[in-house]
Amino acid sequence: MRIWYQSYVDYENGKTYWDRLRKHLEAVADPGTTVDIKGITPHDSYAHVLVEMRCAREVICNAVRAEREGYDAFVIGHFQDAGLYEARSAVSIPVVALGEASMLYSCQLGQRSGIVTINTRYIPWFHHQITKYGLERRVTGVHAMQFEPGQILKAYESQHRADEVARSFAEQARPLVASGVDVLIPGGGIPMLLFSAIRGHAVDGAPVINGIPIAVKMTEMAVKLRRLAGLGVSRVSDYVQPPIEILEEFLTHPKGL
């Protein structure tokens, strides 16, 4: 099984993160599963919706490329899931996203989940995600630290910065737990991987989940179910596939100006 893992960081700007992510993916994937990390340049270095939309377009194109290159599935390894629904409508292979997979699995671990993201500017985006996924009664709170994506990458190069991120996460998580949240979700692949070294990670008794292996395992399951039963996404509503000429038009006309 071959999986395309789409990071929103490129190797040049996230070498230490990529190297650690590669080892983590190798450790969690089933024998016989190959997970190839692919990046985006310019990378997602600033928390803003325009950056998300720029990256989303490239992600959709890369999902099409992955299918045409023979990959069995495509993972959006970015918690904001920008481009998820559009990518699913563009390809036939399974498309799994870090944010959606994390939120759905957290619902099996507790009744109320909360997200701690890296920047306050992501809070509205996450609320839109939660509503889109129909999880308003299960994912009930979003708090934020105050880092740019590019800044938090520095935590992979400094234990002092890594400890600072962990402390900041706990500070934002505690009020969520006090309000009734019983599962905590770091709002990003970068903090998830950073915290993966903490076995049994919890804040005031609430488990802190690592969505990266969750997304990988959901992807492997999706591929296996497709092979076993032909199971795939519905083409009735959100994931209706476009005619090939419309898809090609999208791929070949990237500029709005």
Image (cartoon, helix red, strand yellow):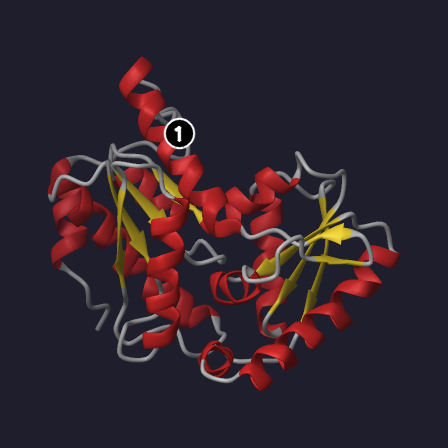
Expressed as whole percent of the image width and height from the top left, the position of residue 23 reads 35, 58
- Count residues near mark 1 (Cα–Cα under 10 Å), then give few for <14, some for 14-19, many for 20+: few
Expressed as whole percent of the image width and height from the top left, the position of residue 62 reads 22, 53
Q: Residue furthest top?
A: 229
Q: Quadrant of residue 86?
A: top left
Left or right, residue 134 beside residue 15: right
Which residue in the structure is indicated by mark 1? 221
**Residue shown at 45%/83% (left/top)?**
157
Residue 14 vertical placement versus 6 (above, below):
below
Left or right, residue 221 beside residue 257: right
Residue 179 vertical placement versus 154 (above, below):
above
**Residue shown at 49%/58% (left/top)?**
80
SS for dot 1? helix
What is the three-letter code of the residue carrying label 1?
Met
Residue 83 visible, this angle: no
Q: Quadrant of residue 145?
A: bottom right
Residue 255 visible, this angle: yes
Quadrant of the image containing the N terminus: top left
**Residue shown at 62%/46% (left/top)?**
131
Question: 24 or 223, which lies in front?
Answer: 24
Q: Residue furthest right?
A: 178
Left or right, residue 108 beside residue 102: right
Quadrant of the image containing the C terminus: bottom left
Expressed as whole percent of the image width and height from the top left, the position of residue 191 reads 54, 66
**Residue shown at 64%/81% (left/top)?**
164
Question: 138 or 195, which lies in front?
Answer: 195
Q: How many marks?
A: 1
Left or right, residue 216 beside residue 79: left
